[in-house]
Amino acid sequence: MKSRTIRALQSGGAAFVGLAALAACGPAGAAKAGGRPTFEGRGPITYVAGKDASGSVQEMLDRWNERHPSEKVTFVQLPTDPDAQRQQMIQNAQTKSDAYTVLALDAVWTSEFAAHRWIDRLPEDRYPLSQMLKPIVETGKYRGGLYALPFSSDGGMLYYRTDLLKKARIGQPPATWAEMKADCAKVKKLPEARGMSCYAGQFQKYEGLTVNFAEAVNSAGGVVTDAKGTPHVETPQAKRGLDFLVNSFKDGTIPKDAVTYQEEDGRRAFQTGKLIFLRNWPYAYPLMAKKDGSSKVADRFRTAPLPGLDGPGASSLGGHNLALSASAENKATAIDFMKFLSSQEIQRFTLSRAPGAPTYEALYKDPKLIKQYPYLPTLKQSILHAVPRPRVFQYGDVTAAIQQQVYAAITGSTSSAQALKDLQQTLRQQSAGE
Amino acid sequence: MTLSPKLRKWLLYAGVAAVVAYCLAPFYWMLVSSLRRTSDIFANSPFPTRLSFENYLAVLDPSESFTRALLNSLVVAGTTTVVALVLATFTAYAMARLEFRLKRLVLTLIIATSMFPVVSLVVPLLKMFVDFGWINSYQAMIVPSMSFTLPLAVWNLTAFFRQMPDELEHAAMVDGCTRGQAFRKIIIPLAAPGMFTTAIITFIAAWNEFLIALSMTNKPEMQTAPVAISTFSGASQFETPFGSQMAAGVLVTVPLVIMVLLFQRRIVAGLTAGAAK
Amino acid sequence: MVTTQNQAAPRALALPAKPPRRRPRATSGTGRLAALLVSPTLLVLVVVVLYPTLVALKDSLYGTPGLNPKTGFVNDTDPFVGLQNYGAIFGAAGARFWNAFWNTTFLTVTTVALETVIGIAMALIMHRAFQGRALVRASILVPWAIPTAVSGLLWRWIFNSNGVANALTGQHILWTTEGFHAKLAVIIADVWKTAPFIGLLVLAGLQVISKEVYEAARIDGAGALRQFWNITLPLVKPALLVAVLFRTLDALRMFDLPYILIGAKKTSVETLSMLAQDQAANVRFGPAAAYAVILFVYVFLIALAFVRLLGADVLGDDGPARTRRWWLPRRRTEVAA
């Protein structure tokens, strides 16, 4: 990036400015002392995120600003679309602008931002990481270093219809895919289940498809990429995972429509009584439990960990982590602010406002919160079994390749074996080629 | 192919109705959707079952600063239009009325500038403006908007100036007017419909701009309306706020529709004048 | 927002050349005056277009920096790769480029063809209509006045799987998934937005055809169809040709409509502009710039071919015009005479 800025500047006839930029190449404000960065500078900073739905961000910032009148934090609100958010953050990094200080980074962007040195490595000992769930902390790490501080998480769960399962005399929610299919067969014999489909997740060609594919592969005991970023999708485990999705589409376990499903489409299908099982995030819980008539399944559903091949499956992790823009100023303030924003107190407050997945273990045991969000214990199980999505620096390419091949497989235009073979080849080229 | 006059008349009515329906039906759907409640946004009835302004209230809520965004759009598009029009008037006059070397080259250059994909202009411009310290300023949105409004305005005005008879200007100059006076007193008034049309076209093009405005701003109080719409969110990150998007869409479009309604006679007159030569 | 800004241009350029006649000879001051008048525009365009274009040209010669396996960081400098980014389109990785290339071409051809046909039909109807004229004219401007970003959202809403498009047709088409229907959705939305404008331009052309021509034709016993084919079409042809040319140039750079309506990285509708944007979004500026340059050259060649083959008078050159012979005497000539 630096070279690019310099080139641009030179061609603009300002070579000396370029040289100045070269001299200032290290992360601004983070002077390296004995290999450990120190964070200097206090003053106003910004917090950069997509719009928060709960409306609690400004309240949290107000709390901070009251206590730190000379180190005020301003909220920079980005578009709702995650791609647009990432784009804006990258543009900010490339122009070495100090407009963005603390970034709310999607968990899967950590590696890319860290590898490009768009964000600074954080001082691990300053944060209570040990009180957080370990898989969540892992999403903020790159090559062993902490680059993003867990702020909010997200895990997939299986929503199921308690009323129908009970009627069909099924005591437990399914733990495996086979059990789920068997349960569906039983439920579908009930007169009230006429026209219902068994299961859906997110299968539209977008990030959700990567999530669902990774979950299927992980739940069958496979991995998409290992810790070093090497792909392993041409394995029997990965094939069994993908086959679950492909065969479910073929035999009608998953309705054909589901290739257009994003989170909300699935939720609507479930809450209008079209689905027996649904894979979704926690956000859907209070919406489907609403008793204003918008949901036909309020009081008639619960959550369970995702099913897998031989036992409970593994979820992917979503959520946002806090990162420090490398080109920012007032980094000492930023480090403190990040600690404040990721604190247990704040997370409890946010959670009381809107459903989510906190990063602190203690909050999953809090009786008051559990009363508000009965899904919390299930979610904790789901997160403890979770496997991060591929942690590679060119995540954008990896997820695009996955979506391409998996979509082709579930829509029947290629076989699952061929799709995985092609995917393995593409991913290998990507990790080797650059 | 002779049809009775009555049948012809009815056919014509049917044709007119078809044209109007074609153009307005999707817009109507936007309007209807914006007036539904969030809970029945997926209803497909031709009228809202329960009329609700909740989407409009949500959009106009002070926390969204959407009115501010509309104002920003107005400032950016308005300034762009004025500046582009002034610059283009000079250039177009030279193109239409003066003989000079490299004229063909200049015209080719101006046309060629509107062939480069805008998506690729953004990053170099952004780098440049960061160096200028122009981020979050109106000029950072206005100057790049010139890249597509200026060629447009030049082409348009050149055509309008060309169609005006040379004789008038000559007569004025014979009468002792300077070229500048002749231009101001004869050409400009005559070209008024053309300039008006050009202004509207330029304004709409600038009003609709999204990519540049998105990249050049990061403060909510500087965002333009299309950018503000992109930051709307539902009650959670997964919900698409269709209702408020449609409501905001109506709010962004209505000023232009009103403008078009008020001036449609002139727009068409301008266009016709252009072709009438 | 960026793809449709030029609809207006065609009319302006539609002007056929002036009849050859003596122009005032350039006086000694003319050149300087012209330079003075033209330079502000050129200056602005150099800054906002030419400079970024040159940067892109230069960037297209550089590759993507790799990952240093030891540090785990991406290298600081972009390697110089010469013309490799351009050569890559003929290699194995070129499949995506060619897909985008054909999508761009296909969408351009279909949308422009449909817009032309529908636009002409609209113009003919509007030309005849006298009652409710204001209403018709105002309403055909509505699609054009809706920002492309908003119209993308609107059509995505209409084409939602539970949306009104499916409800009306009684189908259950999953419009936004990969497949031909995604192309169709883009075509419908684009035609809706721009056909009225072509209609308006043709209408402007129609209004200058004198009634006598038709009367003469009617006396000669020409039917409505023949009148249209032999009189109307040739007369509006110059205006139409340039309108079509500029719509074509716009359509070739189509970006936001498919991006918002269907989404990024969809094989069915990915255009060259979208591909360039996607490469840049994934921090591969070299290929991104190369695609942008290729697209520019493609647009330029099409424009050139159009002008050469069809004689569309883009530059408004003086001199004997090729389009001239179809035109019947008009008021203007009478005035001049």
Image (cartoon, helix red, strand yellow):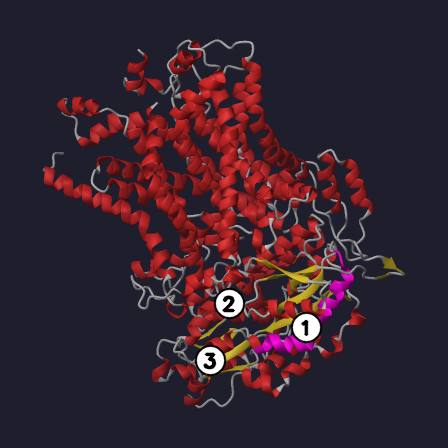
Residue that numbered label 3 is attached to: A289
Q: Main secondary structure of the magenta part?
A: helix
Q: Looking at the picture, how far across and down is residue A276, in whole percent?
A: 44, 79
Q: Which mark is residue A136?
A: 1
The chain under label 3 reads A
Q: CA distance from mark 3 to mark 2?
A: 20 Å
What residue appears at the point 52 percent right and 20 percent down from the top-left corner? Answer: B104
**Counting residues from the N terminus, which is met first, the one under dot 1 or under dot 3?**
1
Report if residue A335 lies within the magenta region. Answer: yes
Q: CA distance from mark 1 to mark 3?
A: 27 Å
- The quadrant holding residue A422 is bottom right
Q: Secondary structure at mark 1?
A: helix
Q: Secondary structure at mark 2?
A: loop
Q: Is residue C118 left or right of residue A423?
A: left
What's the amino acid at mark 3? Answer: Ala
The chain under label 1 reads A
Write down the region rendered in magenta.
A329-352
What residue appears at the point 56 percent right and 15 percent down from the top-left corner? Answer: C31
**Counting residues from the N terminus, which is met first, the one under dot 2 or under dot 1?**
1
Q: Is residue A91 above or below residue C251?
A: below
Instruction: Choose mark 1 or mark 3, whichever is in front.
Output: 3
**Relative to the observer, which residue lies in front, C296 or B211?**
B211
**Relative to the observer, which residue lies in front, C224 or A362?**
A362
Q: Looking at the picture, how far across and down is residue C6, in whole percent?
A: 45, 36
How many residues crowd around disc 3 within 10 Å: few (fewer than 14), some, or many (20 or more)?
some
The chain under label 2 reads A
Residue that numbered label 2 is attached to: A202
Can marks 3 and 2 be said to lie on one chain? yes
Q: Are marks 3 and 2 in contact (CB under 8 Å)?
A: no
Instruction: Choose mark 2 or mark 1, whichever is in front.
Output: 1
